[in-house]
Image (spheres, helix red, strand yellow):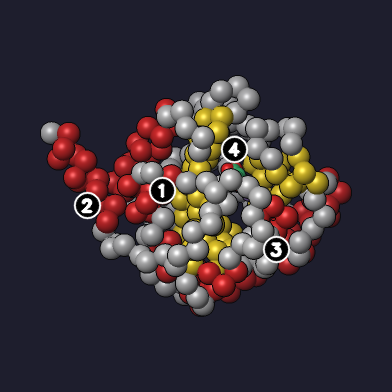
Amino acid sequence: MRLTQDQIDTFNREGWLLLPELFTPEEVNLLRHEALEIYKEHRPEVWREKNGAPRTAFAAHTYNEAFRLLGAHPRMIEPIEQVFGEKLYMHQYKINAKSAFTGEVWQWHQDYGTWKRDDGMLQPRAMNISVFLDEVMPINGPLMLVPRSHNAGDLKASHDLQTTSYPLWTLDEETVTRLVREGGIVAPTGKPGSMLMFHGNLVHGSAGNITPYPRKIVYLTLNAVSNYIRTPTRPDFIAHRDFTPIETVDDDALVRLARAHRQAAE
Ligand code: SIN
Ligand code: MN
């Protein structure tokens, strides 16, 4: 799958791009079901909120077949190869739960801030792409983006080890206020299966979810192979050390797995 020149121009200008309903209900239902199974597991890759609800599951492509296929899916890999003009490897993979009633805040941050400081990534040549597993609504803690903030470069940040269960290099209120004055805030919403890509320096965050509607989103961070991380400090399941270029699977791979699961259940 290739992006149009218009889509590439929009991405370069705004720092993000939404492709509505890129994955079908059959494909997303499989992924949603598998995510719920993973959250039940007690393993080091599954992190919980301070209240015990699942917050994120790391590295699911290494222990779950459906998420392995998603991580090598041509609808996700090809557009990013097109943007960077080279092969990619998986830097990070997480399924964020933002559970009904209990999902907690993600403070304002740039992802490249963490990749650089904690992982030794040379340049912001890694892309975040996310697939909505539930409907993302204005009310259930959507991801909020500050358009055009990717042009601000790598901003001063401080290491927040307190507010949530996840350590993050976060931005101060003055910086966020200045960037929002220039670019505003958008919160892309959409049906399950929609795909959002955003630049590693784009400022983003999300509020808590106090609604009965869960908001699960899968985030892949695809890094250009030449930009592999030099001085990782985080565990391997958070910042991967396998820099093997991703080879894509067939476009119908998820549909075939969904059908195989259904047949096995009959
Ligand atoms: C992130 O910024 O990595 C996650 C934010 C979210 O899931 O709302
Ligand atoms: Mn982030």
Q: Earlier in the sequence, mark 3 or mark 1?
A: 1
Q: Residue furthest right?
A: 174
Q: Point out residue 125 in the picture as x, y percentages from the top left corner.
A: 61, 68
Is disc 2 in contact with disc 3, using a CB cutoff of under 8 Å?
A: no
| CA gap, disc 4 and disc 2 | 32 Å
Q: Earlier in the sequence, mark 4 or mark 1?
A: 1
Tag 2: residue type? Arg
3 or 1: mark nearer the eye: 1
Q: Name the residue under label 2.
A: 256
Report which residue position mark 4 lands on.
Answer: 141
Tag 4 secondary structure:
loop
Q: Which of the 4 image quadrants contains residue 199?
A: bottom right
Sequence-wise, the earlier of marks 2 and 3 is 3
Residue type at mark 4: give it: Gly
Q: Which amino acid does label 3 sit on?
A: His
Mark 2 or 1, nearer chain start: 1
